[in-house]
Image (tube, rainbow, N blue to C red):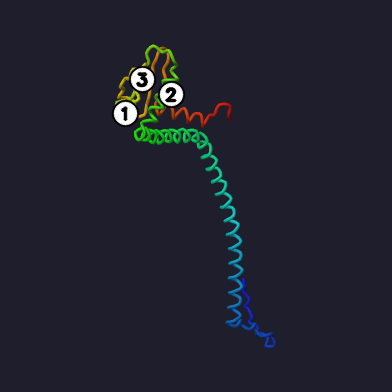
Amino acid sequence: MSAEPALWRVPALDAPPPPKPPSIQDLQRIEDAARAEGFEAGRREGLKAGEAELRRLIAQIEGVVEAMARPLGRLDDDVHGALGALAVRIAGALVGRAYEAEPGLLAQLVRTALEAAGPGQREIELRLHPDDARVLQPWLPDWPDARVVIDAQLARGDVRVHGDGVRIDARTDARLQAALAAVIHPVGGA
């Protein structure tokens, strides 16, 4: 195996000159253009990715809101009930204070309850809180058929009337609950 020696050839002297290297300004323009093109491509990619992520988050939030709305529908009745109970307690406290400040209002309530018991009752038992019984002393002669029974378990402003076959619950809570029920579920209403 013989290897032939390689011959070296002299380059042609009339060949075109090598290209001129770019100037610093040319290199800066090329770099700026490449940077702007890369930035724009990255911005478009980022916007697409951001839009996809935004759609995913919106769908997720809608799912959470929908899931929360289901129990909130059930809680709506509970909230109404709790607000109603709170309103009854607040109104009860205000009514109690009104009776303390103006005993004539309580006397009118007692008169209405006794009238509701109906005439001709043999014996009517009027149950009152001890402080209310004391305050209503001036009105007791107006109700000669009623026997006053002190009931410390009643709150101020509570009245109960018991007679033959008649029980009238004129406790503040009972009256306010009835009023609340009439507002929430009116007769003949929706």
The residue type indicated by label 3 comes to Leu
Return the residue at label 2: 112
Q: Is residue 35 left or right of residue 152?
A: right
For the view shown, which residue lies furthest in the bottom direction? 13
Identify the residue shown where x is 45% and y is 36%: 83
The residue type indicated by label 1 comes to Val
Q: Earlier in the sequence, mark 3 or mark 2?
A: 2
Identify the residue shown where x is 53% and y is 39%: 69
Q: Nearer the viewer, residue 47 or 178?
A: 178
Q: Position of residue 63 (x, y in %)?
A: 55, 42
Return the residue at label 1: 135
Quadrant of the rendered structure where residue 177 is?
top left
Task: Check if mark 3's residue and mark 2's residue have beta carbons within 8 Å.
Answer: no
Marking on residue 147: none
Q: Nearer the viewer, residue 141 or 160?
A: 141
Is disc 1 placed on a helix, strand or loop? helix
User: Quick check: 52 above or below 179?
Assistant: below
Return the residue at label 3: 126
Task: Check if mark 1's residue and mark 2's residue have beta carbons within 8 Å.
Answer: no
Q: Position of residue 111 (x, y in %)?
A: 41, 23
Q: Quick one: label 3, few (<14), some, or many (20+) residues within 10 Å? A: many
Is disc 3 placed on a helix, strand or loop? strand
Placement of the C terminus among the 4 image quadrants: top right
Q: Earlier in the sequence, mark 1 or mark 2?
A: 2
Cα distance between the residues tagged 3 and 2: 12 Å
